[in-house]
Amino acid sequence: MKKTLLAIAALTALTSGAAMAQQQDGKWMVRMRAVHIDSSNGGSTNPDLGLSVSNKTIPELDISYFFTPNFAAELILTYPQKHDIRSNGSALGDLGKIGSVKELPPTLLAQYHFTNFGAFKPYVGAGINYTRFSSVKWRDDVQAGYSPSIKKNSWGGALQVGFDYALDKNWSINFDVKKVYMKTDVSLAGQKIGDLKIDPVLVGVGVGYRF
């Protein structure tokens, strides 16, 4: 009898927890993610230029507003991130690291959230990315020999898929994948010779708080 009562109590607690987990109905959600930026599928649209940027892992802050249980908008923020610039093309030669650049890439996404899977809450999203490139620094010999420069602004699309798993009525864990289309003009001695096409895939894990 005692074991039966314990089993009933445990089942009640689990059921109650699942019910609470499904009742995340606040309008706002804030997430903190650790995101790995994989730019290996980028490079220059001019094969002779052969430019690429380094991969890295960054912190990310995301703020979502739910217009309905299914439709939301998410603003993705971080601070300016520094990347190494490398060259292995014939225009500059196989020079390895030739400089660095900082990029600030706020992204705004419209999302559809699926609500019929209980605590498991998958979503898809699409939107627009703006990237501001700054603090461009070139290796001394590259600067003296080629006078390279890059355009400071970039606009492009963004796609997203992910899920939240509700732990209770406020907290959840999150897994998220984004594809961001990002490129900028590259010039040598004032003459455009191609694009630096980064187009990173961002894979993130984190926690969310809905209220």
Image (spheres, rainbow, N blue to C red):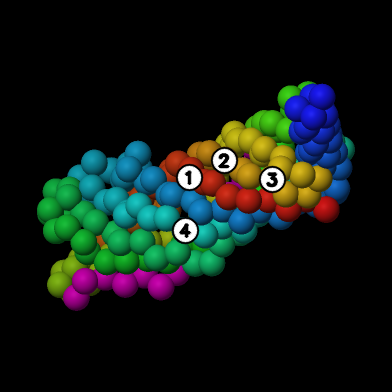
Task: Give the Cα separation between the discs numbered 2 and 1.
Answer: 8 Å
Q: Quadrant of residue 77?
A: bottom right
The three-letter amino acid code for the residue at tag 1 is Leu
Q: Counting residues from the N terminus, which is met first, the one under dot 2 or under dot 1?
A: 2
- Contact, mark 3 vs mark 4 (Cβ under 8 Å): no
Amino acid at the residue labelled 3: Ser
Residue 7 against residue 99 in the figure, above or below? above
Q: Amino acid at mark 2?
A: Asp
The tag earlier along the polypeptide, 4 or 1, is: 4
Q: Are marks 4 and 1 in contact (CB under 8 Å)?
A: no
The foreground one among 8 and 137 is 8
Density class for disc 2 (Cα within 10 Å; few <14, some 14-19, many ≥20) is: some
Q: Quick one: label 4, few (<14), some, or many (20+) residues within 10 Å?
A: some
Query: Alpha-carbon distance for marks 2 and 4?
Result: 14 Å
| Residue 101, label in figure | none
Q: Amino acid at mark 4?
A: Ile
**Residue bearing the label numbered 3:** 172
Question: Does 145 appear in magenta?
Answer: no
- Mark identifier at residue 58: 4
